[in-house]
Amino acid sequence: MPTTNPAPSTDFIRAAIEEDLRTNRFGGRVCTRFPPEPNGYLHIGHAKALCLDFGVAEEYGGLCNLRYDDTNPTKEDVEYVDAIKEDIHWLGFDWGDREYYASDYFERLYEYAEQLTMRGLAYVCDLSADEIREYRGTLTEPGRDSPYRNRSVEENLDLFRRMRAGEFEEGSCTLRAKIDMASPNIVMRDPVMYRILKAPHHRTGDGWCIYPMYDWTHGQNDSMEGITHSLCSLEYEIHRPLYDWFLDALGIYHPRQIEFARLNLSHTVLSKRKLRMMVEEGIVSGWDDPRMPTLCGLRRRGYTPEAVRLFIRQVGLAKTDSVVDIALLEYCIRQDLNLHAPRAMAVLRPLRVVIDNYPEGLVEELEAVNNPEDATMGTRQVPFSRVLYIEREDFREDPPKGYFRLSPGREVRLRYAYFVQCVGVVKDPQTGEAVELHCTYDPSTRGGDAPDGRKVKATLHWVSAEHATPAQVRLYDRLFTAPNPDQEGHGYREFLNPKSLEVVTSCQLEPSLASAAPGSRYQFERLGYFCVDGVDSRPGAPVFNQTVPLRDPWARIEEAQRKG
Ligand code: ATP
Ligand code: MG
């Protein structure tokens, strides 16, 4: 759609809204809605819709309604209704007092359906679901008229009222719009408006046994709420003629539907149906499993709303579907946590180190910087003593070329502390594995520099054994090994990453982390970002979830492979 004066900095949706504001199409108003179906938890794809729906409303001084699309009682649950609200608030958006439900409008919608029936624009059809499909035709063949298509208005009205009254069995008949069985657009071939479902609804109880279809519901609800721009994902593009047809047939206020591309994320699936299956099959621990692409999963993983919104901004808006690399999401959380997460020292796989020449019983409090990116976050004291833990992988008895960390005879820096030199290795007689190192320290290097100017090539993190807090740390990897688990092969299950969760017990943390509050986030120096698990953590027995490693190990591996 060419505009005479396209604003260079805006996307096609904002451009369309600005155009409508210029032409006064909706009296200068902007009102959007976010329409979740309460049949699952929100995922990162919904975050895109949320940022758009609430975002444009905010930007143009308008409003965004929350409207539950609760037209299918068999799949819906209040558990989801509550979770959706929590997630929207977490992301930073608010619908004020405009919390609506499609089911609030069932009565008015029914009246509209009677109007169309009375005007000969809807009819009761006795074809079964299979027969309707068969009569519908295909993309290349036109459909055939239902044998019930030419019932009289009186008969249709009588049957429709009796449908509502519960006189007919489920599946025995439907109300259909009378449009055009030869339309090139299959959606327009006499779409079903109501089906019989003898199921109680979580809000209307037993009040209804006919339930409206999405297409019949959505546009009319938009109209009743005075929505100006009904933004939805691309799969609704072919439904737009129907959206328009219903509103025009009823002659009521007509909002504008605009479609945008769905967000797809690599190495995961974004479909509530599949996510629910993973929960039900126990592949993950729940909707909030930190590996899930749900908003509650990301939150438990340590993602911030700011990082999610930054990610959505980076993705931008497009009119064609594409898959966004999950590495971009990880980049966004690193950006945010680098600026805001306090640093701490944590040893995931401890190796005991005894500093032979450090006085027994002496404890020094050494000053550590909380965040080098933000001086206002100050410093803290970290205790240093004769027995420490370092990371097992920071020691190699036979260091390969380029390995600069600790090895026999080698001197390294302990962060915020001293230079130490490895003078002995105690090994497990059975396995030959190092179980304890002996080092000496140079007291003149306190704080991390040698007065004689000598250099070391590595700085290690450490914790004082006597002061350390033991903890469980959960390391996460991608849920799927394939970038597009949905598209490749025969089903996403075969690409499940068996190593997506690694539980590391007996980690040792610096004592300041003993009282870390659930949900609080840290950078464990040299390792990555971690967040106190809000579900399983206990005072004195903290559980940390890895949000993201400091650098992307996959990128590093790939880089190494590329270089051969
Ligand atoms: P799913 O396929 O995951 O079940 P859905 O479209 O059925 O998703 P709804 O609850 O109906 O889920 O979605 C609410 C809103 O979020 C809709 O406007 C929908 O277009 C939008 N939405 C859902 N998934 C995505 C996605 N991956 N990217 C962008 N928008 C999405
Ligand atoms: Mg939907």
Image (cartoon, rainbow, N blue to C red):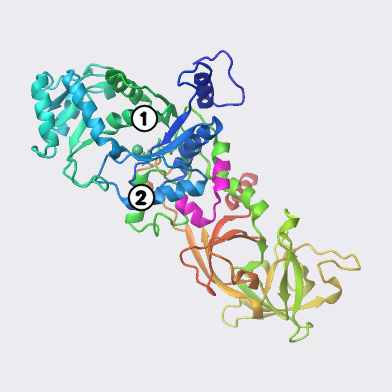
Residue furthest top as drawn: 4
Q: Amino acid at mark 2?
A: Tyr
Foreground pick, 530 / 201: 201
Task: Give yes or no for residue 334 being in the magenta stretch.
Answer: no
Above or below 180: residue 434? below
Q: Which numbered marker is on residue 222?
A: 1
**Relative to 555, is 506 above or below?**
below
- Who comes first in sequence, dot 1 or dot 2? 2
- Is label 1 in a helix, a strand or a loop? helix
Q: In the displayed structure, does residue 482 sit left or right of residue 441? A: left
Amino acid at pointer 1: Asp
| Residue at 63%, 67% in the rendered image | 346
In percent of width and height, residue 340 lies at 65, 54
Question: In the figure, residue 157 lies in which quadrant?
Answer: top left
The residue drawn where x is 19% and y is 35% is 195
Left or right position of 483 against 423: left
Would you call the spot at circle 2 few (<14 residues within 10 Å), some (14-19), or many (20 or more)?
some
Q: Which residue is mark 2?
A: 80
* Predominant SS of the magenta segment: helix
Percent x, y of residue 337: 63, 53
Q: Which residues are magenta?
A: 295-311
Q: Is residue 299 magenta?
A: yes
